[in-house]
Amino acid sequence: MTKMIALDLDETLLNTDKTISEENAAALRKLHTAGIKVVLCTGRPINAIWGYLEQLGLTTAEDYTITFNGALVIQNTTKEALAQSGLSKHDFQPLHAFAEENGYPLDILDFDQVYPVSDLTPSVYQHMLKAPMDFIPTAFADLPEHLFSKAVMATDADVLDQVVSKLTPELHDLYHVVRSQPKILEFLAADMDKAVGLGQLLTHFGWDFDDLMAFGDAENDLGMIKAAGDGVAMLNGQPEIKAAANHQTPTTNNEAGVAEYLKQRFAEILD
């Protein structure tokens, strides 16, 4: 029985214009009211998605969000961390050396702010993220000695194609590398993805992955799609995601694919 619904944002719950359709929102609000947990899973910080949480009514004491692609599980209203993990400055040294050698940009994020690495090629991440986070340009040597959530390379898609082709086996061993958007490549702790945060949240409620339904479309959703009792790929999803999923939405993200699938599965609530 599904007790929790986990949802990726871009090209899944969101239309291409970055809005949640009223059809999707209405279905999720009704399920949330019926007692099913609705959990947004994103690489963004919670402040950047607060409008979506309000639209869905996910503002009770029992509502949580998976942020930074699994590195932070946060209570929505108090902003208290249920679980948090990440990487040290030292952990990013090989990635910094790779970016420096090849002329690539790099942004390193903790859980509150972004550090565009100022001794490297300038990044476009701030322009792309458009989120209420502080961006503090900092040379790598001057980064603080504390926990970071991830690093990001944000640049033209063809440049990122080149980055992916140049990544060494050693770098793949050190980081979980995911292409969250055509112009954004993310570097997480080697064992980190959205399924990690969801596993911690499910344990908090005394549940397991059999109780989870997860929706996604892209590489950074693969872990939760595989782990969920019902992994649902978007019709517009990548072939690898579709191959790993239990089911597929009948329509795309721009045609309220999430709501259309939920109506099939929860007809007794959504009729």
Image (cartoon, rainbow, N blue to C red):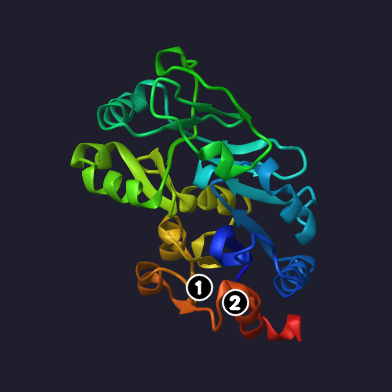
Q: What residue is disc 2 on?
A: 257
Drawn side of residue 176 relative to residue 254, left or right: left
User: Looking at the image, is 137 positioned above or below residue 69?
Assistant: above
User: Looking at the image, is 244 positioned above or below residue 178?
Assistant: below
Q: Earlier in the sequence, mark 1 or mark 2?
A: 1
Residue 237 lies, in percent from the top left, at 45, 70
Do the residues bearing badges 1 and 2 touch, measured as CB atoms within 8 Å? yes
Number of numbered labels in the structure image? 2
Drawn side of residue 70 relative to residue 153, left or right: right
How many other residues sit within 10 Å of disc 1, few (<14), some (14-19) or many (≥20)? many
Of the residues shown, which amino acid type is indicated by label 1? Met
Quadrant of the image for the N terminus? bottom right
Residue 8 lies, in percent from the top left, at 56, 59
Q: Point out which mark residue 234 bears.
A: 1
User: Looking at the image, is 8 positioned above or below residue 115?
Assistant: below
Q: Describe the element under mark 1 as helix, strand or loop.
A: loop
Q: As drawn, which residue projects farthest toward the left?
A: 169
User: Looking at the image, is 41 positioned above or below residue 22?
Assistant: above
Drawn side of residue 57 relative to residue 37, left or right: right
Q: Describe the element under mark 2 as helix, strand or loop.
A: helix
Q: Residue at x 73, y 85 (%)?
A: 268
- Which of the two residues, 210 or 233, is positioned nearer the viewer here? 233
Q: Residue at x 79, y 54 (%)?
A: 54
